[in-house]
Image (cartoon, rainbow, N blue to C red):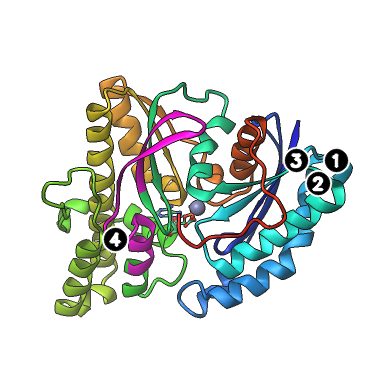
Amino acid sequence: MLILGIETSCDETAAAVVADGRTVLSSVVATQFELHAQYGGVVPEVAARRHLENILPVIQGALDGAGVFLKAIDGIAVTQRPGLIGALIIGMAAAKALSYTLQKPLVGVHHLEAHIMAAFLTETPPEFPFVALVVSGGHTNLYRVDGFMEMALLGRSRDDAAGEAFDKVAKLMGLGYPGGVKVEALARAGKASACNLPRPRVHGEPLTFSFSGLKTAVAYRLKQHPEILADDVARCDLAAGFQAAVVDSLTSRAWLALEQEHCSRLVVCGGVAANLHLRQVLQAHASDTGIDLFLPPPGLCTDNAAMVAALGHRLLMAGERLDLSGDVFSRG
Ligand code: KG4
Ligand code: ZN
């Protein structure tokens, strides 16, 4: 069964062909980083217009990459929520048009649940149940996952998402957009112990994340010590201290969730899961404690359409369908 996945929720136009929900035959991602860099962040209307230009060539690229014609596709999966409305509409319109003309089933997927499916596109997928930590630009969510359609939210961020914190701190440090990769590159040359930053907690809600206080702490430090930005060592130490605080906040709650759920399997996914320091801390803890860690390769952690096709496959198999009146939604 061949599923064409389509993803346009934010600033990546992506399409992929996945066989049997497991094998990625092709995955094309057209990023818009350069387009939005001049504004220091994603401009929704600009993103939507670029999706419109990209969508057909990206879909064609995915078909060519998989070596299949459109008529070989058995179903179409498209991100339906959450995301930027104007951006989502472009992917949805393309998916509906294909579904209608090919007379093939269409299904809408939840972007964050699709991120979790990246773990099923690797050689050793997890068994149920497991805990999933989804760390993206817009969300930081912990789930208990008992099945492809049984994902229960255990915790989330009360303010900024982890990726958003990386992006905002990058902006404060004058590194530009997108921030995660740039902060990581600086942090690699820095010493986290030279720059201690807070790990905000929410009283009485141990699985709730909070990153805005951390971002504010970085802003204060830069205001009090603007000379940091002119000193290579101090810049790298600040980036390393910030990154360590984010990674601590993420991992401490992930371990707690595993304990609370009496679970020994952990999936970590979403764009921030591409961060090497986070991956190293997770891997070290997993090998110390015997936790089964499922960490998709970085290319499957950041936005892509293979994960959308993988979840779409499961939903279509379960009989889910979206008709041509199906809408898109900004919130999850
Ligand atoms: O999942 P994703 O690709 O898109 C959304 O669904 O939001 O996540 C994008 C987020 C951005 O905030 C980006 O800065 C962050 O992931 N990110 C990283 C890294 N690569 C991407 N953050 C830290 N380190 C990275 N290497
Ligand atoms: Zn995402």
Disc 3 residue type (three-letter): Gly
Quadrant position of ligand 1:
bottom left
Question: CA separation, marks 3 and 2?
Answer: 13 Å
Instruction: State yes or no: discs 2 and 4 in contact (Cβ < 8 Å).
Output: no
Quadrant assignment, res 52: bottom right
User: 28 or 226, which is in the foreground?
Assistant: 28
Q: Which residues are magenta?
A: 141-168
- Disc nearer the start of the sequence (4/1): 1
Is ligand 2 less than 8 Å from the beta carbon at label 3? no
Residue 68: which numbered mark, if any? 1
Disc 2 residue type (three-letter): Leu
Residue located 53% across and 60% down the image: 329
> Badge 4: how crowded within 10 Å, few (<14), some, or many (20+)?
many
- Identify the residue at the far left of this view: 203
Question: CA separation, marks 4 and 3?
Answer: 44 Å
On the image, numbered disc 2 is attached to which residue?
63
Say whether residue 146 is left or right of residue 297: left
User: Of discs 4 and 3, which sits in the foreground?
Assistant: 3
